Image (cartoon, helix red, strand yellow):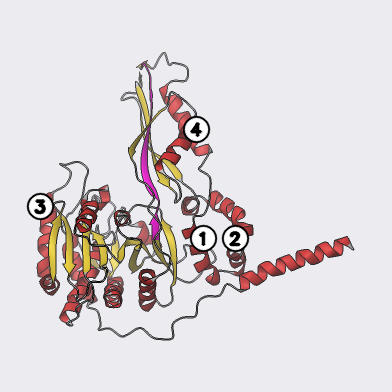
Amino acid sequence: MTGILILCALAAFVALLALRALAMRPPVPASEAPAPIAPVDADGAASRLSRLIRARTVSSRDPDGWDPKEFDGFRGLLPGLYPKAHGAMELELIAGHSMLYRWKGKGRGEPLVLMSHYDVVPASDEGWTRPPFSGDLHDGKVWGRGAIDTKCTLVCALEAIERLVEEGFVPERDVYLSFGHNEEIGGDGAPAIVAHLAAKGVKPGLVLDEGGAVVEGVFPGVSRPLAMVGVAEKGVTDVELSVKSAGGHSSTPPWKGASWRIARAVMRLEARPFPAGFPEATKAMFSRLGPHASFGLRLVFANMWLFEPLLLRVFGKAGGELNAMCRTTAAVTMLEGSPAANVLPAVAKAVVNVRIAIGQTVDTAVARMKDVIDDPLVEMRVLLPGEPSPVSELSGPGFDALTATISDVYPAAVVAPYVVMGGTDARHFSRASSTVYRFSPFEFSKAERASMHAVNEAIPVASLAKGVEFYARLIRRVG
């Protein structure tokens, strides 16, 4: 009799889990079709992006490693490429080379801020199908450094404003274009723009920067395209580990010398990763994806109270992006020892790039690393501290306007929030607004995503048409 009761209770429990999974249904799509817009001149946009890619706006922390004339030349092209937009907007240069445009609205509502950056990382010709600064139009794509990261968003925003001005549209509220010149090196452009707006008493109502995109095949069990909207980003901090020694000749090595201690510290960090946990933004992502997932995954997402420990274990074992979604990560990226093969190092060093999860801080991350390394001879120094950003609102007018616009342009995509693993200029605006989002309005294949900071960066001309449509619709909806 007891066994029967246990089986009945177990069956009821399983049925409850299944019912919770079945109750996860996708939201009913809006019955209203999006308002039609005039056809986008995709070829014209591609031609203008091509011209801008030819400006070698490579940023560098080395004062002699970048050419200000290339940045000046880039800016000098814009009024001729977008004359109507420049006739309607005011331009201020911030921090020397960052651009802040203002399209004055009719009212006094909180403004829309569209962000991009026009600096790029270095590139040599080696390995490229088309030269990286050629801007070649080939095989239906625009090729070159910045085609995806992120001269494409700069071009699409200006294209949208150019056509809206031509149509006689005037926004209800101000629209700002924030185009940074040194995002790739974590420079002062975007922080200076935020400080400038704050000094003028401008509080943004909606801020949009690069980050997520429309992607496929990135989440197991979900077959539909996903429009991933970054609502926060992990902190980025570099920590230097160093051990000093007397040095000397390698023929008489000491016991447990500087290199050995650095190697042991690295191995200890690898052996004891940071604790795993899902922030609320990631749980919200699961809730959005759940109704579109396979039944097995839906069962898990609908019953996170039960399956969360198992899911954390699976994500951690999977490594890569799934592991990074659920914890602070510490990657050793630089090692330094002796300058010669037969010389013992006087100082052995390692630099650890730490991506700090939402809910943690630089101080807590460094304190844990110190405990894990557990060696008083290993000195730790924070080189570039960067805290995680606040989590932006997951509902409300700003988020709803953004998600509705995405659905207008990409009706088949499932819109879901997520935490950005890398760093963007958007984090600086988090001090001024609780509605800061990270989404590039393009469909990116795995190869296109992989080309950022790598070879063969290129964007399809058809994608530019979608990008222009997106910005035009967002400005009309918000403005």
For the residues carrying marks 3 and 2, which lies nearer the camera in this image?
A: 2
246 or 10: which is nearer to us?
10
Disc 1 to disc 4, C-alpha distance: 29 Å
**Quarter of the image where one finds residue 6:** bottom right
Residue position marked by numbered label 1 in the rendering: 283
Q: Are marks 1 and 4 in contact (CB under 8 Å)?
A: no
The residue segment tinted magenta is 231-246
| Position in image of residue 441 (x %, y %) | 33, 69
Q: Secondary structure at mark 2?
A: helix
Q: For residue 118, say whether it is visible.
A: no
For the residues carrying marks 1 and 3, which lies nearer the camera in this image?
A: 1
Q: Quadrant of the C terminus?
A: bottom left
312 or 217: which is nearer to us?
312
Disc 3 to disc 4, C-alpha distance: 48 Å
Q: For residue 61, say whether it is visible.
A: yes
Q: Earlier in the sequence, mark 4 or mark 2?
A: 2
Q: Quadrant of the N terminus?
A: bottom right
Residue position marked by numbered label 3 in the rendering: 69
Q: Secondary structure at mark 4?
A: helix
Residue position marked by numbered label 4 in the rendering: 371
On residue 304, the disc is 2
Horizontal side of 155 relative to 308 (left or right) equals: left
Disc 1 to disc 3, C-alpha distance: 46 Å
Question: What is the residue that sits farthest to the right in this orientation?
Answer: 1
Q: Is 233 included in the stretch rendered in magenta?
A: yes
Horizontal side of 86 relative to 223 (left or right) equals: left
Q: Amino acid at mark 1?
A: Lys
413 or 309: which is nearer to us?
309
Q: Amino acid at mark 2?
A: Met
On residue 230, the disc is none
